[in-house]
Image (cartoon, rainbow, N blue to C red):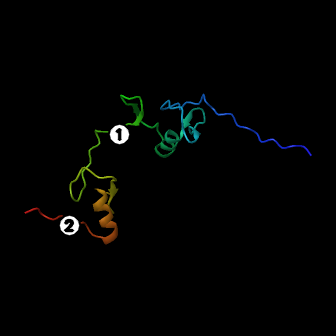
């Protein structure tokens, strides 16, 4: 009998993301037009947002996601600016995670307690 040999894939050491220039990714993607090679993070971001993923290189050389500091939001119910996730109310108002979840569960706005 003829011995079977498994095809050995060579590691693609020369891959580089066309957007953030990283060389390591769990999987590689192509842009929507198919020309640019993208890392998994940039490919997923571009697929969802239809624009390149914003990034910067930190002082220690790591690639970091650029988070906008000009887009300050306030919760329409409690006024907070700090939340792990922004949500939308039934009529489109911006809500913090706590107020959004409360509204979803109780179908009414979360009451704010005064600190008297």
User: Quick check: 75 left or right of 90?
Assistant: left
User: Quick check: 27 left or right of 77?
Assistant: right
Query: Distance between the Cα atoms at labels 2 and 1?
Result: 31 Å
**As drawn, 49 above or below 12:** below
User: Quick check: 53 left or right of 12?
Assistant: left
Residue visible at 48% across and 46% down in the picture: 48
**As drawn, 61 above or below 82:** above
The image quadrant that residue 109 belongs to is bottom left
Residue visible at 77% across and 42% down in the picture: 6
Nearer the observer, 84 or 32 = 84
Mark number displayed over residue 109: none
Nearer the observer, 110 or 25 = 25
**As drawn, 15 above or below 88:** above
Spot occupied by residue 40 in the image (x, y as percentages of width and height): 53, 41
Which residue is under mark 1? 67
Spot occupied by residue 12 in the image (x, y as percentages of width and height): 63, 32
Which residue is under mark 2? 111
Residue visible at 33% across and 57% down in the picture: 88
Nearer the observer, 61 or 28 = 61
């Amino acid at each position: 009998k003829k011995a079977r040999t498994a095809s050995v894939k060579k590691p693609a050491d020369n891959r580089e993301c066309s957007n953030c220039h990283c060389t390591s990714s769990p999987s590689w993607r192509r842009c929507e037009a198919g020309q640019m090679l993208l890392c998994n993070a940039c490919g997923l971001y571009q697929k969802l947002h239809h624009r390149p993923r914003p990034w910067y290189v930190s002082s220690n050389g790591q690639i970091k996601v650029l988070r906008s500091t000009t887009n300050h939001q306030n919760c329409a119910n409690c006024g907070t600016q700090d939340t792990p996730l922004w949500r939308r109310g039934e009529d489109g108002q911006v809500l913090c995670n706590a107020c959004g979840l409360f509204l979803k569960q109780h179908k009414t706005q979360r009451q704010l307690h005064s600190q008297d």
